[in-house]
Every structure is written in structure tokens, then in C-alpha cells.
Image (tube, grey):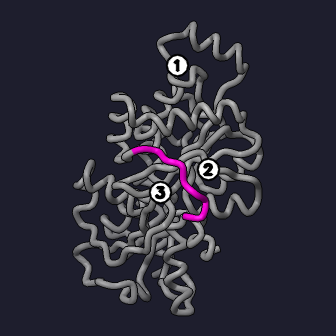
């Protein structure tokens, strides 16, 4: 029975991700965004000054294809303002992005709050800026089930199947583990079967299509889909919301070029002040980027 379930889940998860370019997960080379600005001469001059390309990673809190689509305009905007070419290094897991930061292979990155807390225990990591959404730099985890099920609480998920996002995800894993710790249980004891989807929208799809009974997801992803793709959450029911956590930040390391980082930070903090930047932020459902104190992630540290 369990083997059959595993085969079915595996097969359908493959179908869920099959429409994207398979190189998104396996290719270790930078994804060429072709973000060249129209002012080539100006860009060439900037390259001569810095003699480098800026590398960034955006953790796949949503599917790789959706990540690229959502953040392409933001990266184009930064690149044009910066006058230096930017290339995206895309990876499947949050740990892989942390490794890139640790090895000095990135200038900056947008990472999950849980991954941030883990990373800065291992190597120096600083916050570049963080999004402010609906007036605050905080977000929540949602526990979801299929609307057609009779499950109405986390307690009723005992013995059911469950989807996590990533082992370093705060909303897609650590919050659910916290709930289990409170009742002195573990995933393999509480659930009949668990899977990792490596993207919050994949977890939502798994619940929506009945592949699993429940999932832990990023509330920001749910709210984004609610506005932009409501058909994807038609059969989703939220049965629990977490407390407020510090929102996923843009980060950099001591290996980053500090002059370039300062320029990128200035671009992010001021992009809500011009029409183009404001339009991009609206598409991302972000009010603006702000400076935040690392203390807003203190509650997440207790999970680790």
C-alpha cells in the first residue's frame, strides 16, 4: 500500500514539474537571463570599472519557472540602475543556495528566513534589505488541506499524508516540526507518509490534486496565487496559520564587493520612489524594500 502511494506521488510530482526546463535543477551553470541593458556602451564602461559580473540566487520558494518569471523584471531593473550585468544562479534546494553564499560564488541572494538563520550560524551573512508587505516585514506559515476533505485541524492530520517544502524552509517545514515537537512527536510517527516538493506552489498543487492530505506552505505564496492565479487554490482550505515571522531577506557576505552591494542596497530601498520600480514592486505584491534588524528572526532561531 505504502509502496503504491510512493509510486503514485512520485509519478505525479514528476508530471507537475515536467513542463519546465529540466536544466533548471540539474544545470550548475548560471542561468543566462539576457538582462543586457539597451545602453551597451554604458554597460561596457561599467564592466571596465568593476571588471566583473554580479551573481545572484533567488531561492525557489515557488517553482523555478515561476521564480524566473516573477523576479526577471526586478533583476533587470537592478541591472539597469547598477550598470553591471547580472546573472542568476538557480538551484533546487535552499542548502545549495546557502553553499553558494558560503563559497563566495554569489554577490547577493534572496533566501528563506529559515535558511538565513541556519546560514548565519555557519558563516558571516548580512541582510541587504527585506520586503515590506502590507505595511510590515513579517509573514506566516499556513497549514493547508483540500477543501473537499473533512479535515479541519492539525490534530486531524495524524495518520494522513503530508507535504513539506524544503528541510531549511521556515514556513514549509520548521513550523510544522515545531507543532509536532509540542505534542512530542515526529513526522514519521505522526504522518503515514511525507514528501518534499521543493517549492511551495508544488505543495499547494499536491494538496489541490489530492496527492497528499495536507501541507505546510509560505503564506506569501498562497496570497500571491490568490490574487494572480485564484484557480490554483480553488480546492485549498487553510486550517492553521502561524505566528508572525521575520520575512525572507536579501542577503550578502563579506566576499561580496561592498561598493557594489551598497549601490544595490540603495537601488532596492529607493525603487518604490519611481514609477518603473513601483510597478515592479506591485507585480511582486511588495510595498517597498526596507532595512530590518536581525532580531526579527529571533523566533525562528528557536526552531533550530
Q: Of 103 and 261, which appears nearest the observer? A: 261
Q: Residues within 10 Å of mark 3 (few under 14, many from 20)?
A: many
Q: Residue at x 64, y 30 (%)?
A: 54
Q: Is residue 295 magenta?
A: yes
The stretch of residues the image draws in magenta is: 288-296
The answer to which of marks 2 and 1 sits earlier in the sequence is 1
Q: Which mark is residue 176?
A: none
The answer to which of marks 1 and 3 sits earlier in the sequence is 1
Q: Is residue 99 magenta?
A: no
Q: At which x and y percent is residue 266?
A: 55, 34
Q: Of 94 and 120, which appears nearest the observer? A: 120
**Is 238 situated left or right of 78 in this image?**
left
> Where is the N terminus found, in terms of image quarters?
bottom left
Q: Residue at x 59, y 42 (%)?
A: 57
Which element carries disc 3, helix, strand or loop? loop
Q: At which x and y percent is residue 286?
A: 38, 47
Find the residue positioned furthest to the top.
41
Q: Are marks 1 and 3 in contact (CB under 8 Å)?
A: no
> Where is the C terminus found, in terms of image quarters?
bottom right
**Is 152 situated left or right of 59 in this image?**
left
Residue corresponding to mark 3: 199
Q: Residue at x 56, y 40 (%)?
A: 23
Residue mark closest to the camera, 2 vs 3: 2
Residue corresponding to mark 1: 36
Q: At which x and y percent is residue 19?
A: 41, 44
Separation of disc 2 and disc 1 at Cα?
Answer: 27 Å
Q: Residue at x 48, y 28 (%)?
A: 76
Which element carries disc 2, helix, strand or loop? strand
Q: Quadrant of residue 139?
A: bottom left
Q: Does the image show residue 7?
A: no
Residue corresponding to mark 2: 127
Amino acid at each position: 500500500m505504502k509502496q503504491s502511494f510512493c509510486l503514485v506521488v512520485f509519478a505525479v510530482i514528476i508530471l507537475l514539474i515536467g513542463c519546465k526546463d529540466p536544466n533548471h535543477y540539474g544545470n550548475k551553470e548560471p542561468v543566462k537571463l539576457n538582462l543586457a541593458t539597451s545602453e551597451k556602451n554604458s554597460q561596457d564602461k561599467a564592466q571596465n570599472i568593476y571588471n566583473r559580473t554580479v551573481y545572484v540566487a533567488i531561492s525557489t520558494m515557488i517553482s523555478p519557472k515561476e521564480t524566473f518569471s516573477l523576479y526577471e523584471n526586478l533583476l533587470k531593473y537592478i541591472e539597469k540602475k547598477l550598470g553591471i550585468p547580472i546573472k542568476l544562479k538557480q538551484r533546487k534546494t535552499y542548502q545549495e543556495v546557502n553553499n553558494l553564499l558560503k563559497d563566495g560564488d554569489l554577490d547577493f541572494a534572496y533566501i528563506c528566513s529559515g535558511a538565513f538563520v541556519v546560514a548565519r550560524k555557519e558563516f558571516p551573512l548580512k541582510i541587504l534589505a527585506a520586503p515590506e508587505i502590507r505595511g510590515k516585514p513579517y509573514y506566516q506559515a499556513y497549514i493547508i488541506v483540500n477543501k473537499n476533505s473533512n479535515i479541519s485541524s492539525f490534530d486531524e492530520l495524524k495518520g494522513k499524508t503530508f507535504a513539506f517544502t524544503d528541510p531549511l524552509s521556515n514556513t514549509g517545514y520548521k513550523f510544522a516540526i515545531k507543532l509536532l515537537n509540542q505534542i512530542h512527536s515526529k513526522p514519521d510517527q505522526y504522518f503515514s507518509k511525507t514528501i518534499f516538493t521543493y517549492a511551495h506552489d508544488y505543495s499547494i498543487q499536491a494538496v489541490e490534486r489530492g496527492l497528499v492530505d495536507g501541507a505546510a506552505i509560505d503564506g506569501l505564496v498562497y496570497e500571491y496565487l490568490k490574487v494572480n492565479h485564484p484557480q490554483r487554490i480553488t480546492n485549498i482550505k487553510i486550517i492553521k496559520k502561524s505566528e508572525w515571522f521575520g520575512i525572507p531577506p536579501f542577503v550578502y557576505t563579506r566576499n561580496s564587493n561592498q561598493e557594489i552591494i551598497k549601490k544595490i542596497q540603495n537601488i532596492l530601498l529607493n525603487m518604490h520612489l519611481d514609477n518603473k520600480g513601483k510597478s515592479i514592486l506591485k507585480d511582486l505584491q511588495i510595498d517597498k524594500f526596507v532595512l530590518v534588524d536581525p532580531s526579527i528572526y529571533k523566533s525562528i532561531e528557536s526552531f533550530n
